[in-house]
Image (spheres, rainbow, N blue to C red):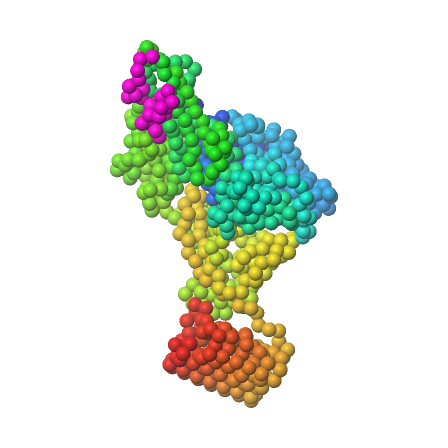
Amino acid sequence: MRGLSAVAAFAMVVAVVAAPPASAAPGDATVVPVQVTGDPAKRFNLVVLGDGYTADEQGKFRENVDKHLNVLWTIEPFKSYRSYINVYAVSIVSAESGVDCDPGLDSPRVDTALDMGLWGGCDPNSVQRLLTVNNTKANSYADRVSGTTRANRQLLAIGNSDTYGGAGGTYATATGGNALSALITPHELGHSLGGLQDEYDYYARGVRGDPYEGGEPDSVHHTLLTEPQMRAQQKKWWRWLGERSESGGQVGRREGGMYSSSGVWRPSAHSMMKTLGYYFDQVERERMTQRISAKTSILADGLPATAPVGADRVLWVETMYPVSHQLDVTWTVDGTRVVARGTRNLRLSTVNLTPGVHTVAATVVDPTEFVRDPAVRSSAALTQSRTWTVDTSLSTPVVPVDAAFTNSTPTTAPVGATDVVHVETTHPTDRVLPVVWRLDGRAVDPGGPGGNDRAFDLEPLGLTGTHTLTATVGARTLTWTVDASRPTAGYTLSAPLVSGHRSYVYNGPFTMALAGTDDTPGYVVREFRTDGDGWFNYFGWPTDPDSPWHFTPQGTEIDSLVYGKLGVPRLSPWDNVPTSYGTHTIEYRSIDAVGNVGPAASFDVTLLPPPPACTRTITGRHPGALVVRDGVTCLDNATVTGPVTVAPGAGLVASGATIGGPLAAARAGTVELFHSTVSGPVMVEGVPGGVQILGGAIRGAVTLARNAAPVFAGVTVHGPLSCTGNTVAPDDLGVTNSVRGPTVDQCR
């Protein structure tokens, strides 16, 4: 598509889906360009179809598409290669709302345009989560998107359902409204587009898969080989071994995958193809990079090479421009590289060609760090060339060409602070049109490779706030708004036992809600990670996207999968991972609609074992002294008017209690005080475990002696604090104590 009229076609539409008119009848459809970065013939076209949305529910479809896409753009390689992709939404009116067999096989079938249904289309031999679509009908609606073909497009059908479901055959499907729906989309595209396999160690949820018994899998991310064998044979993911995995941990060899619990290995502990919420790891990312690029032509255009040209000619190529980096262009004359590497134009008059016929070639290579396999790098997906015959005896007529833009990064939506912004211009035969870039009105050097002034990389500028970027060629100027304002993130936790500055202590389950805000419209993605593991998409809670995340020591089982395991995560109920007790660091951040990543912040959470079970519980008022002779006595918001003594081997757990005298425990089984007040000295010595004093006040001296790993945090002590002979110094878990007397020995 050439000429000025092409510019208007390359637009990014902010309003994702325009609702059909109120009079729309079932079967009516509206095609809306969501994101158009170039001619569909030269782009990878993602066509998103809605099914089960009535005329009154098209706004819901709009919200679902927005969320699904914004999540997709945070996941590599979709994030870097977003500019390779045109996205079109097909807003289809269904007669009835929903999808078939939702949630059960006995649920009614509904009248929808694409016949989408759970249970593999209501098949009792299938599984609930398998969401199918009528492929013939889907293609008939996708054919309405002008310029796309079955060869250059990928279909994604979104069903109007809040049930977890999707599929990744030739065409990807996902439900629209489940908490995890926006993560089903990249997983299923991993199947449909990338040819990736599931890394589950089960097929039917809750049923551990049988051992793998086949030969070496064709899957790029499954193997029978050991790490030494991969290195020695230079097979599978040997180039990535030992790297920090993009999905957490290290790239190595983890047992389980392809629905088998053992006998086959995958690269990472968890990744997009095993656990929704994590990124693709490097092995999967490399494959997805190849497949996305292969749907385009990275050498997008160039001077035709069908006939010899003269040495007075300017040769030119136009390349694709990932959002994250520029492609390399190398020029050769008769096989010898010339100085103009990087530039998209070669003025032959500067090469000093000897009389005669020469061969000039331009080779475009994607230098992405996402690819390490030379075979992938040299494939047509990431390397393309064009060759011209140059005859110095020929002369090129000079044809007047107006200076104009023919293609560009869309100007109708903001660009991010780290984006590569690009333009293409008309191409005179005898000269190269210079492009002048200005930031906030000041001329700036794009600093591209080889003096390439067709692109401007914003990342090195470290911009913040909002800016205006322009590109001018001749009398024509394009303008972009640069959104360099990072989104912010915040967290809300359920009430802890005690807390300090970004330190929180619990002895049972707790919840975390993350909020993300930004100054531009669009769904803000929120992420968190624990103890430096992989970043995980925060989607609320699997049963309710508006509920906070639930952390427990071993996680919560929902539909035979485990969520919210603090520390080392687990997915299947049979996963054998360490318990979560101890202190963990949780980092969190947000990502806005244009791809800006907000600064990560963190807080610490300490999870203590729960108190022992009570054999006796006291509430209300207990007159006089209390002697705990055996078992575990619990003071639940009780008031003891006298001293408390805990005999050897016995246990005391006090929550919100008041003790009207001293507390003494020698060789007790456990002593745990939570937000309790003791009106006298406290002496705890020789307790082998379970000394936990958190919050509250002690109106006297405190002595902790010869105990095993005591915890003493957030306590106000109205006297001296002496700690001697404990296996380790008492731990305040990052929550400061207030001691009004002297501190001795381990507590000094």
Q: Is residue 24 visible?
A: no
Q: Where 579 falls versus 737 (above or below)?
A: above
* Span highlighted in magenta in the image: 331-356
Q: Percent position (x, y) of residue 315?
A: 35, 21
Which residue, as the protein is rendered here, is positioned at the far left? Answer: 442
Which residue, as the protein is rendered here, is positioned at the far front? Answer: 232
Residue sitting at x 31%, y 23%: 432
Residue sitting at x 43%, y 37%: 368
Residue sitting at x 39%, y 76%: 748
User: Could you say which quadrant of the image residue 25 lies in?
Assistant: top right
Residue sitting at x 73%, y 43%: 125
Q: Percent position (x, y) of residue 695?
A: 47, 74
With 36 as the anchor, is 61 left or right in this view? right
Q: Where 55 falls versus 265 (above or below)?
A: above
Q: Is residue 335 magenta?
A: yes
Q: Where 226 falls versus 473 (above or below)?
A: below
Q: Is residue 668 visible?
A: yes
Given residues 595 and 411, the one toward you in this image is 595
